[in-house]
Image (spheres, grey):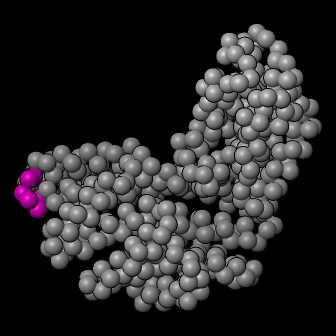
């Protein structure tokens, strides 16, 4: 990549116009000639624009492959330790993402970039764009000697798909990671894998036995390395999974143990614990008590920038108030949730809330609107690969059509549910 290409790529990444970059330095016409490769930029020009682009002067120049490899290794090592990256290093990686380097370099570059935009500075559209770019440079075949690097690249890809709520694709990358687990020596990273595997299985399986198996393996390893924060996190996960398996006493036990371990200032964990204790009380038909837990959960979340967590609470409050037939509160929390949720970023949550909204149409005997909305969100579920939700909703509308004696439509939706149940077992 020539200097002009590098300047243009960084300028576009930072969202700068040509005028913004060269204001007070030179003319836009000169920059255009540089970016188009028609003019060789002067040293003074490069020295002036490099700080505005957030890189070192030498990063804009042609560099030896050995120098790039060494710098990438240093950034990768630091990122593995700190799970963070400075802007200058981020820009350097982006500059070198599309140059022709050995696979070992591309693995490190794309692992950091995908993980960064999936987990740290969350921009899932950008993470997916980088992921698609990585597919051009990284082979599907694991190269000998690079097994551990592939393991971490697959982790970044899996995290991105999990956050996009494409749990089937996330599970695919978990499968690939599991094949490489024997090459990973860090016990905490192995524990992290088991926890990732557990929460992904939780999203795609109805029976949580397998999820709990992996959660227990993660718990044992976190105990071994004495990571109290992660121990509490796994206990929360197990509490959720026990609840999903209707093992309510074990759910309460796990959540209570987690609460005892959590730092009183950890509003995030405390909000999750209160929320899931509320869910257990709903299962025990203690709706008024559940509402208290849900509202405490919202209080914890209000201290944080965790919109999706708040939406989950809104959804559960809607369900409780439907049970209590308090329709004004149903309408209030449902609107709060649907206003806040992004269908593209959180398709599972959006479909869940929309299915509840559809249910209110049926309660009001607006059957035409109910049918149309259910068909819409089932189609959306198929497009976004939310197959568990597709199965549940297809069965719901199949039963509805059966009651209406619309047997052909009923059979079609029962067949759809069966089709996706088979798909999930493959």
Residue 102 picture quarter: top right
Residue 366 on the magenta span: yes
| Depth check, front residue: 16 or 353 | 16
Residue 319 appears at what percent x and percent y?
25, 70
Residue 282 screen position, x and y as percent: 30, 81
Q: Is residue 325 above or below residue 370?
A: below
Eyeballing the image, is 287 above or below 383? Answer: below
Residue 249, how many percent across, how many down? 42, 90
The answer, for residue 89, to whether it is visible in the render is: yes
Numbered range of the magenta stretch: 362-367
Q: Does the image show residue 150? A: no
Residue found at x 63% / y 39% = 130
Residue 132 magenta-highlighted: no
Residue closer to the observer: 418 or 347: 347
Residue 396 figure quarter: bottom left
Q: Quadrant of the N terminus?
A: top right
Locate residue 372 relative to residue 379 in the image: left or right: left
Q: Which of the two residues, 322 or 196, is positioned nearer the viewer here?
A: 322
In which image quadrant can residue 192 be found?
A: bottom right
Q: Is 341 placed above or below 9 here?
A: below
Question: Where is residue 279 shown, x and y percent of the image?
Answer: 36, 78
Residue placed at 74% from the left, 23% from the top?
A: 25
Say which residue appears at 36% left-offset and 69% top-offset. 313
- For residue 22, side relative to residue 165 (left or right): right
Q: What residue sits 31% from the left and 53% below the top?
A: 339
Taking the image as shown, residue 343 lies to the left or right of residue 112, namely left
| Residue placed furthest toward the top | 38
């Amino acid at each position: 990549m020539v200097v002009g290409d590098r300047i243009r790529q960084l300028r576009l990444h930072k969202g700068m116009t040509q005028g913004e970059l060269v204001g007070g330095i030179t003319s836009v016409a000169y920059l255009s000639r540089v970016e188009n490769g028609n003019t060789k930029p002067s040293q003074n020009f490069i020295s002036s624009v490099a700080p505005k682009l957030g890189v070192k002067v030498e990063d804009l120049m042609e560099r030896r492959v050995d120098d790039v490899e060494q710098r990438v290794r240093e950034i990768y090592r630091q990122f593995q330790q700190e799970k963070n990256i400075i802007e200058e290093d981020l820009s350097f990686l982006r500059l070198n993402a599309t140059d022709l380097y050995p696979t070992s370099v591309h693995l490190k570059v794309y692992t950091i970039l995908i993980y960064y935009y999936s987990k740290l500075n969350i921009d899932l559209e950008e993470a997916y764009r980088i992921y698609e770019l990585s597919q051009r440079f990284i082979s599907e075949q694991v190269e000998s000697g690079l097994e551990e690097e592939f393991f971490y690249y697959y982790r970044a890809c899996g995290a991105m798909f999990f956050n996009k709520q494409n749990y089937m694709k996330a599970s695919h990358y978990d499968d690939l990671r599991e094949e490489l687990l024997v090459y990973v020596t860090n016990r905490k990273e192995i524990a992290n894998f088991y926890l990732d595997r557990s929460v992904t299985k939780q999203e795609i399986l109805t029976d949580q036995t397998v999820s709990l198996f992996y959660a227990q393996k993660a718990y044992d390893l976190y105990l071994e390395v004495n990571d109290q924060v992660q121990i509490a996190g796994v206990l929360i996960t197990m509490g959720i999974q026990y609840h999903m398996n209707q093992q309510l006493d074990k759910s309460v036990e796990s959540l209570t143990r987690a609460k005892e371990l959590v730092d009183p200032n950890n509003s995030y964990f405390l909000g999750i614990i209160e929320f899931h204790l509320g869910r257990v009380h709903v299962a025990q038909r203690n709706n008024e008590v559940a509402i208290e837990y849900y509202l405490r959960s919202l209080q914890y979340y209000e201290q944080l920038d965790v919109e999706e967590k708040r939406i989950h609470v809104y959804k559960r409050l809607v369900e409780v108030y439907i049970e209590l037939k308090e329709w004004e509160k149903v309408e209030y929390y449902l609107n709060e949730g649907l206003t806040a949720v992004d269908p593209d970023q959180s398709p599972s949550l959006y479909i869940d809330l929309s299915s509840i909204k559809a249910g209110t149409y049926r309660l009001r005997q607006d059957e035409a609107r109910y049918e149309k909305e259910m068909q819409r969100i089932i189609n959306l579920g198929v497009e976004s690969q939310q197959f568990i939700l597709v199965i549940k909703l297809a069965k719901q509308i199949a039963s509805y059509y059966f009651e209406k004696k619309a047997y052909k439509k009923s059979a079609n939706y029962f067949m759809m549910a069966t089709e996706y149940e088979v798909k999930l077992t493959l």
